[in-house]
Amino acid sequence: MKPVRHPDAPAPGDPLGAHYEHCFGCGPGQPHGLHLEARAGEGVALTAEFTVQPAHQGAPGLAHGGVLATALDETLGSLNWLLRTVAVTGRLETDYVRPVPVGTTLHLAAEVTAVAGRKIYSRAVGRLDGPDGPVAVRADALFVEVKVDHFIDHGRPEEIQAAMSDPDQVRRARAFEVNP
Ligand SMILES: CCCCCCCC(=O)SCCNC(=O)CCNC(=O)[C@H](O)C(C)(C)COP(=O)(O)OP(=O)(O)OC[C@H]1O[C@@H](n2cnc3c(N)ncnc32)[C@H](O)[C@@H]1OP(=O)(O)O
């Protein structure tokens, strides 16, 4: 089925912001995290940027492949915000096309391609030097819709308790609404 953008999804161009302070992908409270910043696009699509820091190296001066997969995962996961569906990554298939040097800003673009029951199919691409630059990484993913209980049942109680007792109502909801 064709994906449907939720009527309450952020407007095209709006920043999505971090969904959880301590998220390794987007949280401002993670000193070595990716600090990825995503913006809503048209339809069920978005763009994101991530600048590779020295803490993200694999080989000298180059981004670690797992970190690049994280950037793709985070970008793809952010799409669920446009569907307003709570979902987790079930499958992530990554193509590494070009090495990504430290200091580079990776320009990511992602879209949901189909929804079938609880399954959300999506793809993403990451480019160097700008939104139209050469392709460095690509991914296809399957996210699976879950209930909020997924996090409450499986997450470590300390963090679950802390997130649930956050006095900021919006932050409290966001920690569970989009993803872990
Ligand atoms: C802004 C937010 C950004 C966040 C970005 C980061 C996102 C993440 O990293 S999430 C964390 C990583 N992911 C996880 O921890 C998930 C761990 N896995 C699980 O909890 C479960 O396996 C889960 C929820 C994915 C599926 O389990 P369950 O709910 O029992 O569903 P299940 O019945 O097995 O599968 C549902 C459907 O998905 C399919 N499916 C599930 N996993 C896969 C897979 N790996 N490959 C292909 N299909 C799959 C099943 O075949 C089934 O299809 P159908 O409905 O056609 O029979």
Image: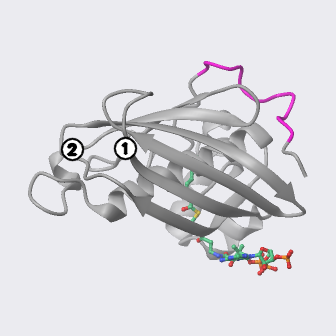
Taking the image as drawn, is residue 27 in sight?
Answer: no
Residue 149 in picture, x, y percent from top left: 76, 67
Front in this rendered view, residue 21 or 139: 139
Residue 126 in picture, x, y percent from top left: 44, 43
Residue 93 in picture, x, y percent from top left: 53, 67
| Label 1 beta carbon less than 8 Å to ligand 1 | no
Ligand 1 shows up in which quadrant of the image? bottom right
Front in this rendered view, residue 49 or 133: 133
What amino acid is at disc 2? Gln
| Sequence-first tag of 2 and 1 | 1
Pointer 2 local density, CA inside 10 Å: few below 14, some 14–19, many at least 20: some
Taking the image as drawn, is residue 78 in sight?
Answer: yes
Mark 2 sits on what residue?
53
Q: Which quadrant would residue 146 be assigned to in this image? A: bottom right
Q: Which residues are magenta?
A: 4-14
Q: Residue at x 70, y 41 (%)?
A: 81
Q: Secondary structure at mark 2?
A: loop
What amino acid is at disc 1? Gly
